[in-house]
Image: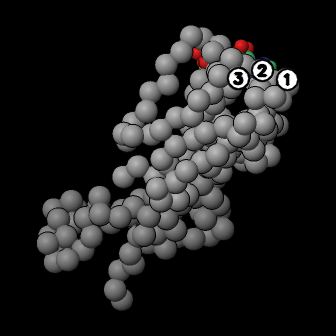
Amino acid sequence: MIHLRSIDLKPAARRLEGFPFELPVVRKFRGVKFGSPVTFLVGENGSGKSTVLEALAAAVGSVVVGGEDVRTDKTLAHARALAAQLKLAWAKRTHRGFFLRAEDFFNFTRRVNQTSAELEGMAGEFEREGLKGYGLRLAQGVVRGRRPRSRRSASSRSSRCSRGWPSRTRSSSSPRTRPS
Ligand SMILES: Nc1ncnc2c1ncn2[C@@H]1O[C@H](COP(=O)(O)OP(=O)(O)OP(=O)(O)O)[C@@H](O)[C@H]1O
Ligand SMILES: [Mg+2]
């Protein structure tokens, strides 16, 4: 389904000065209708594709993956200024989706690595705090996103699965405890 039907520019925006209003793509903006689920923006380097996309992300209030909030990111001040001059027509307003730039991907992977290191640190703390045995494996499994490893062999695990236990791939985020 196409949620955003079209974008247009308020007439007054064509009279504003400075970046990004003086870019030809803004001066000559004639509106865009989104008629298919995927849109390609094609243009020379420096023609303003990223600027338009950033303004669209700001106008929509997109989540920026791995980056700073689109409403506060200083590097997106120009995008917010242009966004304020955009008119969006929605077929169905949505807050799903996200804005991902190459530089955000770098931040995203850095944040994933950082979170992963923090969780691994927590897994170590459980041990230092004296947790042992199945309780330790269960707690570590939660932060590592894995089911605790059973002492039983893989074959007995598969027989447990056949009796209704979740398989290894069924859910890594909600480990179950054994019945007592
Ligand atoms: N913060 C800024 N202040 C002033 N000018 C800028 C700023 N950011 C970009 N520009 C200029 O605005 C123009 C459009 O840049 P933009 O990055 O939107 O182009 P682009 O079409 O995405 O280019 P590319 O194909 O290289 O990704 C370029 O001339 C660029 O130098
Ligand atoms: Mg670009």
Given contact means CB atoms under 8 Å apart, are the residues at marks 1 and 2 in contact? yes
* Image quadrant occupied by the C terminus: bottom left
Q: Is residue 36 above or below residue 154?
A: above
Residue name at image x 52 percent, y 34 percent = 32
Please, what secondary structure does the residue beneath circle 2 have?
Answer: loop
The amino acid type found where label 1 is placed reads Gly
Residue name at image x 85 percent, y 23 percent = 18
Label 1 Cα crowd, 10 Å radius (few <14 / some 14-19 / many 20+): few
**Residue 142 appears left or right of 18:** left
Toward the viewer: 62 or 27? 27
Q: Is residue 169 above or below residue 54?
A: below
The amino acid type found where label 2 is placed reads Glu
Per the image, the residue denoted by label 2 is 22
The amino acid type found where label 3 is placed reads Arg
Res. 29 in view: yes
Quadrant in the rendering for residue 46: top right
Given contact means CB atoms under 8 Å apart, are the residues at marks 3 and 2 in contact? yes
Residue 131 position within the rendered picture, expressed as x and y whole percent measured from the top left: 57, 71
Per the image, the residue denoted by label 1 is 18
Q: Residue furthest right?
A: 17
Q: Is residue 150 above or below residue 74?
A: below
Q: Which mark is residue 27?
A: 3
Residue 74 position within the rendered picture, expressed as x and y whole percent measured from the top left: 82, 37
Toward the viewer: 43 or 164? 43
What is the C-alpha distance between the residues marked 3 and 1?
11 Å
Q: Residue furthest top?
A: 44
